[in-house]
Amino acid sequence: MTFSVDVFQNEYLPEQGREVNAIVTVTGSGTATPAAPASDRRVEVIIVDTSGSMNYPPTKLAAAKQATAVAIDTLRDDVLFAVVAGSHVAHQIYPAAGVVPATPSSRAQAKAALALMRGDGGTAIGQWLLHAQRLVAGYDDAIRHAILLTDGNNQHETAEELDRVLTATRGAFTVDCRGVGTDWQVAELRRVATALLGTVDIVAEPAGLADDFRAMTAASMDKTLADVALRLWTPQGATVRFVKQVAPDILDLTSRRVESGPRTGDYPTGSWGGESRDYHVCVEVPPAAVGDRMLAGRVSMVLPDGTALGQGMVLAVWTDDEGLSTRINKEVAHYTGQGELAEAIQEGLAARKSGDVERATAKLGRAVALANRLGNEDTAKLLAKVVDVEDPVRGTVRLRAAVTGVDEMTLDTRSTKTARVRRPTTPDGEG
């Protein structure tokens, strides 16, 4: 497959200006090429919470088993897979050890083995992840993916223990996390998904698990390249302020940088298929004289063997034309606003939970105004279930007296999902 890298920015800086912002749109498309061969090996691990709470109501564990069976049927032939039951320990349901190729026989055996799942014990998500890491070990050239379902808090590990596991398992595989019901912690699963370059979402009712598992497995099957990195070169004296994925979800990659050459660093982006993602790159450069031009950054996508595919340039031009230097690029403005929107929602919900009505109203009102301005209709609808909106433009709201746990958690969970910036059919590079 190939990568196209498009840069959207206002490259003009005022005299003494230092900060350069750009939105980098990366699009993967096409079929395998000699430079970027598609991976013909995949490893899929399905991890299902089987702690005691999954028995209440009984339909929860039954729905999780059904969803796992659907995921198994969605696997392509010969994809290596395993099913793991998670409580305060990790117990492998199928196969007895390791992973096996998906065939009619192994699928049937795996689905029959789901009857062995029983709700019992506690919750130790780190142990589940370490077990998955052992299963994918040795398949470095494969696309490695896990589905993780839980219904409760990580009660049998400390936050520090889980953090150590997340550090140890970074890069081993990607994981899509799902919480069923409302007794789990959004922040906890978001930490897992962020560390392992995956997604997090809520499945409010057990009946929704099958469709969600099918969609996650199908998306994994559509990936063609594993372990792709975004490589950023910057000039002498420059400092990278941050590198963030901003669409389809917000994911801060800044701390994940791995030095790969002089003034060059790689940021992991996980597995890719035919898709498009947006990244916000912010670089601080030494100021230059009016009229000077500088290459402030060079962005490319890099395969594990070091092959670079696609390239985009981030520029800096100093000017004394205030009209040019104060112009805000619409892509940068849009995603800066999306980041503020996510923060406003999370801070507003936290304030609401703590009983700080004034702060909660102010933050969630700001979120309503931002969602309206940015055209994020999905988030606006979720906000309207938590606050009564009097003026969406000004962000005038009143907290609702009664809000369901599902509505509150859905808003929190999906706060980092962004609306793509609307662009003309043929981008002009300036947005």
Image: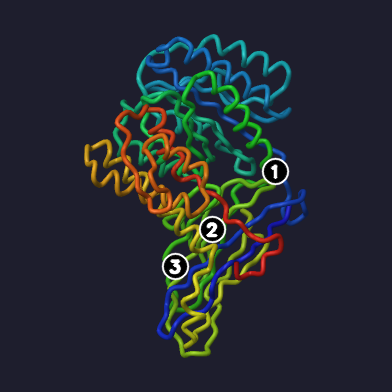
Dot 3 corresponds to which residue?
Answer: 240
Dot 2 corresponds to which residue?
Answer: 279
Q: Mark 3 touching mark 1, by CB under 8 A?
A: no
Near mark 1 (Cα within 10 A), the count class, few <14, some 14-19 or many ≥20, is: some
Front position in the image: 349 or 51 = 349
Residue at (61% x, 18% y) in the render? 69
Residue at (44% x, 75% y) in the render? 238
C-alpha span from label 3 to label 1: 32 Å
The amino acid sitting under disc 1 is Ser
Quadrant of the image occupied by residue 70: top right
| As drawn, 214 above or below 258 | above
Q: Where is residue 319 in the image (x, y as percent from the top left)?
A: 49, 86
Q: Where is residue 289 in the image (x, y as percent from the top left)?
A: 46, 90
Q: Is mark 2 on a helix, strand or loop?
A: strand
Q: Where is residue 268 in the image (x, y as percent from the top left)?
A: 53, 53
- Tell me which label, 2 or 3, sits earlier in the chain: 3
